[in-house]
Image (cartoon, helix red, strand yellow):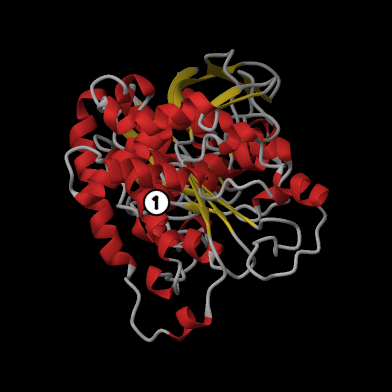
């Protein structure tokens, strides 16, 4: 046989595209030609494949080998195509049996080992959705690939094992002495430091606001002096959020598979992620980007979890404003000259900010050393349109000595999470006809339609809109928060006290510096 074909997957974002790997061997001067828009890493596969075949005991024939990756117009990137190239070339040479509709994913080492690659979960999921259920992956990626329902996973640590499975003579095969694939199977994860709401002293309003934000999926801003507990509250948000459902867990795990492909996963990510980039982070690191195929940024790694921006006014203004689009749509589309990628980005935004550069502009006895201009310029870095998308604006006061001296134990995260889960269950049932999960996802059409409240209840809100102190977007966001407060109270719909508290939380931290 002088021609053979195998299959692999090209990832664009977390969406995979099936790629046919066609190999042809002709009677011409020895050479290796790779077609189909390969990037540098993929183009270097020619030498990796040749050395791996030789060291595994079945060298490539000394003839011209042409391999074409179709569709030819789709850019292909990375080393995950190595194994498919190697198998296709040896099948064309008649050394291996045809593999049929089997998908091959994996990087090969010069010694014949098969190394793990990032993005295994979304690649295998895309293959199964396209009708290719049989996949061959590196041994270190086997447990992650097995998370995809309907996938028949075959995993190997060395290319010689793949050759043997495809009918090669066992006598001439050679195996690497040490297998990087096996060595890298150890989890690269770091132990998590357990934090709990029981650690937070005082801050009754801040604790309640955080619970409301968690229950309804709302965005929140904490504003207060240094040391008041803003960061402590924000870091404890994931601990009171419910575990991810199957669909969300699959999406989150797929994103983390792309960004940390060396880590072995034997279960889906169930806990909501927490991302806290430094204030010097650039727009590409927050949104995603990079040369060639755009990579996911912090907003996508925080999908279905929390994106925490500490010292928010220290971030560059254009970085903060770039969050407005994913906050509205729940996804981020990154366009580059070479490719365009779409990533999910439905996260909860938590901002923490001092009231001024020195942090003492609280009006409670602390001496502020900042001028009026410095205060306006500092907090003005967070634009009005971004602030308008924040549901809860919470002032976090300085903790008193009485709060620190209390010996009674504060309520723990587990107890709060139980109430949050109950509120989420009520929302899910109410919003099921609209295909939504949380109150934060509802829009004005729903809030003023099927969930419309009586004019007597919304009168104060409408007056605030007429006075110009509340925008139309703010009107809807107050209603969303009110529904969440009602869910936490076990009420079937918001009452006047829920609307008043929602409006209070909306305006609490919006005083002019």
Residue 500: x and y in percent read: 36, 43
Q: Is residue 157 above or below residue 472?
A: below
Residue 11: x and y in percent read: 50, 29
Q: Closer to the camera, 453 or 206?
A: 453
Relative side of 29 to 17, left or right: right
Res. 369 in view: yes
Q: Closer to the camera, 119 or 313?
A: 313
Q: Is residue 354 above or below residue 126?
A: below
Q: Closer to the camera, 316 or 333?
A: 316
Relative side of 249 to 91, left or right: left
Based on the displayed image, in which of its 4 quarters is residue 169 positioned? top left
Based on the displayed image, in which of its 4 quarters is residue 68 positioned? top right
Q: Residue at x 29, y 59 (%)?
A: 417
Q: Is residue 201 above or below residue 494?
A: below
| Residue underneath mark 1 | 272
Res. 96 in view: no
Q: Residue at x 62, y 42 (%)?
A: 286
Q: Secondary structure at mark 1?
A: loop
Relative side of 486 to 325, left or right: left
- Label 1 crowding class (10 Å Cα cut-off): few <14, some 14-19, many 20+? many
Q: Residue at x 29, y 33 (%)?
A: 457
Residue 434: x and y in percent read: 25, 24
């Amino acid at each position: 046989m002088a021609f053979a074909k195998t299959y692999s997957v090209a990832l664009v974002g977390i969406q995979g595209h099936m790629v046919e790997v066609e190999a042809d061997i002709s009677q011409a001067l020895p050479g290796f030609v790779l077609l189909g828009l390969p990037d540098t890493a993929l183009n270097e596969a020619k030498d990796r494949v040749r050395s791996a075949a030789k060291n595994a005991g079945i060298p490539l024939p000394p003839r011209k080998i042409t391999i074409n990756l179709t569709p030819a117009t789709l850019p292909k990137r990375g080393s995950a195509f190595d194994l498919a190239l190697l198998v296709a070339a040896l099948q064309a040479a008649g050394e291996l049996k045809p593999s049929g509709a089997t998908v091959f994913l994996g990087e090969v080492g010069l010694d014949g080992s098969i190394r793990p690659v990032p993005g295994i979960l979304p690649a295998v999921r895309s293959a199964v959705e396209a009708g290719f259920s049989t996949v061959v992956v590196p041994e270190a990626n086997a447990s992650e690939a097995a998370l995809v329902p309907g996938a028949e996973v075959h995993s190997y640590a060395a290319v010689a094992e793949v050759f043997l499975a495809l009918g090669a003579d066992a006598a001439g095969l050679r195996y690497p002495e040490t297998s990087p694939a096996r060595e890298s199977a150890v989890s690269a994860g770091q132990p998590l430091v357990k934090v709990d709401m029981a650690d937070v002293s005082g801050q009754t309003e801040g604790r309640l606001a955080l619970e409301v934000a968690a229950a309804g999926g709302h965005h929140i801003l904490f504003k207060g002096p240094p040391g008041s507990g803003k960061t402590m509250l924000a870091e404890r948000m994931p601990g009171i959020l419910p575990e991810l459902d199957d669909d969300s867990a699959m999406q989150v795990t797929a994103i983390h598979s792309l960004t940390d492909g060396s880590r072995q996963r034997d279960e889906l990510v169930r806990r909501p992620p927490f991302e806290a980039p430094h204030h010097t982070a650039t727009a590409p690191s927050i949104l995603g980007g990079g040369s060639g195929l755009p990579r996911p940024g912090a907003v996508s790694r925080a999908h279905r979890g929390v994106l925490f921006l500490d010292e928010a006014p220290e971030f560059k203004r254009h970085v903060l404003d770039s969050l407005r689009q994913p906050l509205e749509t729940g996804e981020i589309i990154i366009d580059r000259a070479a490719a365009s990628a779409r990533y999910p980005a439905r996260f909860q935004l938590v901002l923490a900010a001092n009231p001024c550069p020195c942090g003492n502009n609280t009006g409670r006895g602390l001496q502020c050393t900042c001028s009026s201009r410095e205060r306006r310029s500092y907090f003005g870095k967070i634009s009005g349109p971004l602030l308008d998308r924040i549901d809860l604006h919470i002032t976090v006061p300085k903790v008193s000595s009485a709060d620190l001296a209390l010996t009674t134990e504060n309520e723990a995260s587990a107890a709060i999470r139980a109430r949050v889960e109950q509120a989420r269950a009520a929302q899910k049932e109410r919003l099921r006809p609209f295909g939504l999960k949380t109150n934060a996802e509802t829009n004005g059409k729903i809030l003023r339609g099927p969930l419309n409240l009586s004019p007597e209840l919304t009168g104060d809100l409408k007056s605030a809109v007429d006075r110009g102190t509340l925008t139309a977007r703010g009107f809807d966001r107050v209603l969303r928060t009110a529904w969440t407060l009602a869910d936490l109270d076990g009420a079937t719909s918001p009452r006047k006290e829920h609307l008043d508290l929602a409006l209070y939380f909306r305006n609490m931290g919006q005083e002019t510096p």
